Amino acid sequence: MTIFTRLERWKDAGVISAEQRALLTGLARGEPRSVFLELNVLLYAGVLAFVAGLGWTVTTWSAQLGDLLILSVLSALFVVCFWYCFSRGPAWSPEQTPSPSLVFDYVLYLGSLTYDVKKVVVKPDDVIIVPPGVVHGWADIPDPVDYPSFRPSQNVMQAGRVNPTIAK
């Protein structure tokens, strides 16, 4: 019994769909299959991992290397990324424009994320507002910190609502 016969039987028995049978038949025949989505996910994950490493480096080594050196390296990386994009990108258009190359999107993404890597020293009585969707973390917290947290989510905190732990 060949793989093609088994696939046909599985489809007839309802174990796999016709789409799945067609895909598996193509793979068994050695027909090429696009892995564009998988490669995109891996490349974007790689850029995110690289920027997470930059954030870790800033947090861990800023005291030893100095803020000026770290800021200079991050600024240079940012400038190189955007120089690459502005020198190779198409002119602005109100219409959607295709990417000039596969590398272009990732370099633009890297430059944008590099711009957002920051280390901010927070002192007592400082107020920090973190907009929704902004990735952030805390490091170098020497003492216990008391802070109020306010989350303005729609339909979560109605007017007059009191937190049950405070109400007691």
Image: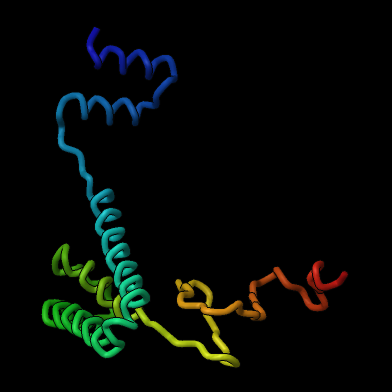
From this view, report whether residue 51 is shown above or below residue 5: below
Q: Position of residue 17 (x, y in %)?
A: 39, 26
**Quarter of the image holding residue 116?**
bottom left
Instruction: Tell which of 147 and 158 is nearer to you.
Output: 147
* Image quadrant in which the C terminus is located: bottom right
Question: Does 139 sit left or right of 85 as displayed?
Answer: right
Frontmost residue, 15 versus 75: 75
Q: Nearer the viewer, residue 22 or 45?
A: 45
Give the residue drawn at x 60%, y 92%: 125
Is residue 80 positioned above or below 99 on the image?
below
Query: Going 27% across and 31% down the picture, which residue do you hit?
Result: 23
> On the rendered structure, is 14 left or right of 168?
left
Which residue occupies 18% across, 69% down? 104
Total marks drawn? 0
Which x, y percent locates residue 43?
24, 58
> Considering only vertical position in the picture, is 71 above or below 35?
below
Residue 61 at x, y percent in the picture: 31, 77
Locate residue 5: give its quadrant.
top left
Q: Position of residue 161 (x, y in %)?
A: 81, 73
Q: Which residue is situated farthest in the right direction here? A: 168
User: Looking at the image, which residue sits at the far top?
Assistant: 1
